[in-house]
Image (tube, rainbow, N blue to C red):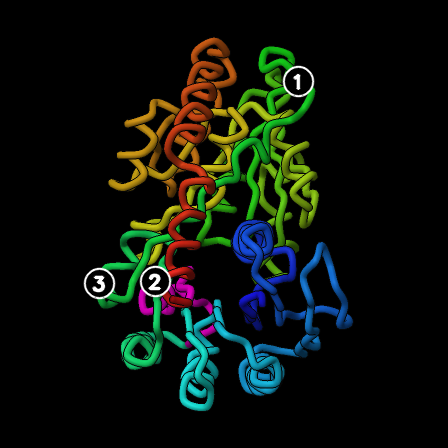
Amino acid sequence: MKTRVCLLTTVHPLFDTRIFHKQVKTLLREGYDVTLIVQWPKDEVIDGVKILALPTPQNRLTRIFGLTGRAFYLAWQQGADLYHFHDPELLPTGMLLKILTRAKIIYDVHEDLPKQILNKHWIPKYLKQVASWCAEIAEMAGARFFDRIVAATPAIARRFPVSKTVVVQNFPKLGELAAALPVSYNDRPPVAAYVGGISRERGLKEMVRAIGLLPDKIGARLVLAGSFSPPELEKDIQQLRGWERVDYLGWQSREGVKKLLSGARVGLVLFHPAPNHLEAQPNKLFEYMSAGIPVVASDFPLWREIVEGVGCGLLVDPLNPEEIAKAILWLFQHQAEARAMGERGQKAINERYNWAIESKKLLQAYRELME
């Protein structure tokens, strides 16, 4: 009889890269019976995964206080052998499931929550520190209940008990972003790409200003793929010099991301030096490397260790559009060096930074719990 596994998220979309494309598909291949509770229009089976639909909330409050109750009820009905949840707001749900069932419980920690809260634009400044402390207490209390903590980075793992914690990093799947018929690097137009959540804290303003500083004769374009957060940011940013050189594609499927990166010459990851960014390992950094393009990245100590260690790009002050523009221009004008950087990045993904290695850690954690 197959082990029944139920994954829960009230925040992430159905086709979230870490949850659906990596973890769920890995578990399916290993023979687990997988159910995913997620925001979706209807219950159905997709790629062998039983989807239990949560309604789209009208606002953040209805998501936190409405969807969590619904997610608990659906999860409890499944009678799963193991529950694996992905959002801090589901901490009470995880605790209840542990108390009311005999199932094993996994908390998957994507971000350093206490630090992340300090950077939330919707929380009043005078409440941020208190909210951060409350988040720390809630996670530590939850950790006492749960059977495993799956941390997305070593920095996050340091906050949890060593005996319960496993690091499963969000590295790319081998070959996923390598185009079957890639455009030769030297034949690509001068395109700088950014893929992921689009916000001020992730360097949107600096990217737009930097592309606007490049010489007209270059014909450079900045291509953005993702969703604006908050949505009204899109209208605000359109007033900046440089926006006339931006192509906004909106959210893209994995195939769409592959197509974009296979035609780009540079990948940008310019997070601001916020507390939760300094030791983050953003997907996009490794996805650019996987696609074989050089990166222009924020000069944080951890990122410097990766980028300079591999030799796959240039590091800049993410708050300085002039410095960003110089780095992009240098890569556009030195194609041989830029192509070599991209090749070194791709080699590092194939050898070290890939999901094939990380998935073994996830499966080992599942096997230990089920034994």
> Magenta part of the protein: which range?
108-123
Query: What is the number of the mark on residue 183?
Result: 1
What separation in Å lies between label 1 and label 2 (alpha carbons)? 38 Å
| Placement of the N terminus among the 4 image quadrants | bottom right
Element at label 1: loop
Element at label 3: helix
What separation in Å lies between label 1 and label 3 (alpha carbons)? 46 Å
Q: Is residue 111 magenta?
A: yes
Regarding residue 198, the answer to whether it shows in the image is: no
Q: Are marks 2 and 3 in contact (CB under 8 Å)?
A: no
List the residue tagged with mark 2.
Answer: 112
Q: Residue furthest bottom?
A: 100
Regarding residue 253, the answer to whether it shows in the image is: yes
Q: Residue at x 28, y 79 (%)?
A: 144
Percent of width and height locating residue 37: 62, 72
In front of the other: 200 or 288: 288
List the residue tagged with mark 3.
Answer: 162
What separation in Å lies between label 2 and label 3 (alpha carbons)? 16 Å
On screen, 44 above or below 47?
below
Of labels 2 and 3, earlier in sequence is 2
Q: Is residue 173 magenta?
A: no
Q: Residue at x 42, y 61 (%)?
A: 366
Say which amino acid is labelled 1.
Val
On screen, 319 above or below 193?
below
On screen, 318 above or below 72?
above
Percent of width and height locating residue 217: 61, 15
Q: Residue at x 54, y 57 (%)?
A: 19
Q: Residue at x 56, y 31 (%)?
A: 175
Of labels 1 and 3, earlier in sequence is 3
